[in-house]
């Protein structure tokens, strides 16, 4: 192998293409990021359960179904196709998804990312009016605050440095925090 061919092979290993974007082959996030971003989901899950269990059990079941779809099948469309599959990423899913799905090498993440946004919005909106009904302004503020904390944490620690520039959440994170790729 010539020196030029060797350099090309090394360059291939350093970067990977995902949906037309050149990404470093190794995760750009510090190890603690996945723990911090994942922790912000706990208050959301607990509050949704509290609010909807008191307000409307049918809505609770719908919310749990939406969350289950968000947490499992959508990971096939996003995480199993991600260049950081099997690595510590911006959430705990980078290390969890390999136990759920085989890597989907060379497949687009775009649909999955947009579905993530849609499901995330539904997960936020479904308990919104019920929070007001069950606990008034304080519970509504707590619900909105839990989502705001999660969004701030994820966009600041993860999205602002993510190389996946086609991601709608990443675009928002880079716009909010003034980072660009």
Image (cartoon, helix red, strand yellow):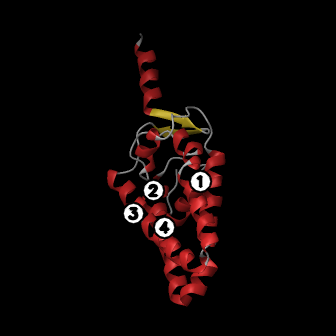
Q: Nearer the viewer, residue 28 or 60?
A: 60
Task: Report which residue position mark 1 lands on.
Answer: 69
Percent across and percent down for residue 121 are 62, 65
* Chain-order first, disc 4 or disc 1: 4
Q: Nearer the viewer, residue 140 or 17?
A: 140
* Chain-order first, disc 2 or disc 3: 3
In the rendered view, tell whether residue 29 sits above or below residue 156: above
Quadrant location, the N terminus: top left
Distance of label 4 from label 1 (alpha carbons): 14 Å
Numbered disc in front, either 3 or 4: 4
Distance of label 4 from label 2 (alpha carbons): 20 Å
In the rendered view, tell whether residue 44 sits above or below residue 80: below
Whether label 3 touches label 4, CB < 8 Å: no
Percent across and percent down for residue 115 are 65, 53
Asked whether residue 85 appears in the rendered view, the answer is no
Q: Secondary structure at mark 2?
A: loop
Task: Report which residue position mark 4 lands on.
Answer: 45
Distance of label 3 from label 4 (alpha carbons): 11 Å
Q: Secondary structure at mark 1?
A: helix
* Chain-order first, disc 3 or disc 1: 3
Task: Report which residue position mark 2 lands on.
Answer: 158
Which residue does the image show at 44% across and 52% down from the upper left? Answer: 90
Residue 140 is tagged as none
Task: Report which residue position mark 3 lands on.
Answer: 39
Whether label 4 touches label 2, CB < 8 Å: no
């Amino acid at each position: 192998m010539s020196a030029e061919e060797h350099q090309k092979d090394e360059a291939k290993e350093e970067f990977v293409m995902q949906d037309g974007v050149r990404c470093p082959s190794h995760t750009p996030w510090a190890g603690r990021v996945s723990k911090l971003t994942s922790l912000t989901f706990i208050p959301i899950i607990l509050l949704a359960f509290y609010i909807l269990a008191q307000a409307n059990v049918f809505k609770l079941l719908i919310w749990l179904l939406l969350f289950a779809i968000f947490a499992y099948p959508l990971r096939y469309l996003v995480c199993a196709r991600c260049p950081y599959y099997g690595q510590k990423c911006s959430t705990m899913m980078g290390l969890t998804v390999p136990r759920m799905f085989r890597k989907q090498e060379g497949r687009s993440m775009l649909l999955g990312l947009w579905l993530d946004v849609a499901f995330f919005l539904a997960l936020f909106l479904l308990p919104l009016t019920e929070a007001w009904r069950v606990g008034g302004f304080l519970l509504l503020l707590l619900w909105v605050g839990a989502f705001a904390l999660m969004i701030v944490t994820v966009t600041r620690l993860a999205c602002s440095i993510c190389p996946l520039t086609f991601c709608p959440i990443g675009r928002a994170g880079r716009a909010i925090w003034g980072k660009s790729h």
